[in-house]
Amino acid sequence: MVPWLIPVLGLLTMFGPMAIDMYLPGLPAIGRDFGADQATVQLTLSWFLVAFGFGQLAWGPLGDRYGRKAPAAAGILLFVGGSVGCALAGSVVGLAGWRFVQGLGAGAAPVLARAMVRDSFDKDRAASTMSLMMLVMGIAPMLAPLAGGQVLAHSGWRTIFWVLAGFGLVALAGLATLRETLHPSRRVMGGGVQALRSYLALARDRRFLGYVLSSGFVFAGMFAYIAGTPYVYIEYFGVPPQQYGFLFGLNVVGMMLVNTVNSRLVLRLGTDPLMRAGTAVAASMGCVLLAAGASGVGGLWGIVVPLVGYLGMTGLVGANGMAGALARVPERAGAASALAGTLQLGLGAGTGWLVGHFADGTPVPMCAIIAACGLLALCINLTLVRRA
């Protein structure tokens, strides 16, 4: 095993956060340059997310059939081409179209990086490795918005996409240093029909769904936090926008710390007990958050502290849930990784919409949705995972 395996795999999982978070500071400038309103500019984010989520369903089976490295490299090249197209786009519709291409390519590397871990390690060691990967990936949401802001200040929004193209080439060079992890004898032959059969078989596996959905609902609470806190912190509590990044960073640091702890504990305690503990703490923190949001006890910090506790649990349920899901079907790790990623992204998109739909100017809708996500995660873990 090459000593830089985990940093490279962590780099391969960064495509989503890098492509989303780095260009967000440039959205107003994009609207001004193209004379487009906010809703039209938001299409550049929506089209990327749709392609990123559903594109994974194709990359997973391709990885099971042709090996991990070749499809991952193809996806990265597609991402690089899409980034160049974004940098040269002449209209906001053209930019949205190239973002769709970029999103299709971005979905390949994370899916197949997780499958490479499952090819190489047993369940608990895979969970430990994925925690370290998530620790590396955690750098992206902290640095990408800052880097995007600096590029925007000194050059312009188009340069952000040139930087993303360069990031893709660096990731491609890192991928080239790794060995292929899926031996030809273990590859799954077949086309689209075989891929559909794989997904139907996974959907009938109760324990697989237990791992995916229990971790997915905890992550869905994180999406509710992302959608709701800019309004709760800045508009309701009056936090200056420049301090919002500090509060956001507290949660990222908490997630990174818990991932570090999980990478060590999982080898001694096992995947399932730690995941169960993570969902239990997430449910508890969600209830505390709802009580504080509804009563106003603790003010701003009554919201911030339980959020740090809740979001920190993604470090327990994320890696352990993915490792548990992939361990169910090691012969179809690519398809399993793809379906898990798509379901989790879909749950996150749904909760983000719910926060906006039920917004009433108070923290209560966001807090209630996060609490519901934590409780659902715990119930699913206890019924589907523990029963087996």
Image (cartoon, rainbow, N blue to C red):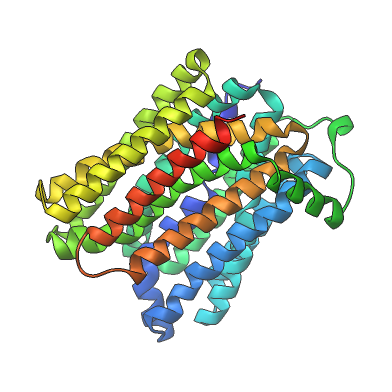
- Residue 330, located in which quarter of the rendered image? top right
Residue sitting at x 55%, y 65% = 48
- Residue 157, located in which quarter of the rendered image? bottom left
Q: Quadrant of the N terminus?
A: top right
- 112 up-or-down from 269: above or below: below
Q: How many numbered discs sit on the rendered protein?
A: 0
Residue sitting at x 41%, y 84% = 36
Q: Is residue 180 visible?
A: no
Closest to the observer, 129 or 367? 367
Residue sitting at x 13%, y 50% = 300
Horizontally, residue 6 falls left or right of residue 159, namely right
Outermost residue, bottom side: 35
Outermost residue, top side: 268
- 353 up-or-down from 125: above or below: below
Q: Is residue 13 visible?
A: yes
Return the x and y of residue 46 as percentages of the image width and height. 50, 69
Closest to the observer, 49 or 89? 49
Horizontally, residue 314 falls left or right of residue 85, namely left
Return the x and y of residue 152 as percentages of the image width and height. 36, 64
- 314 up-or-down from 367: above or below: above
Horizontally, residue 362 falls left or right of residue 105, namely left
- 300 up-or-down from 157: above or below: above
Residue sitting at x 85%, y 41% = 188
Return the x and y of residue 191 as percentages of the image width and height. 87, 54
Q: Quadrant of the C terminus?
A: top right
Return the x and y of residue 341 as percentages of the image width and height. 59, 48
Closest to the observer, 258 or 293? 293
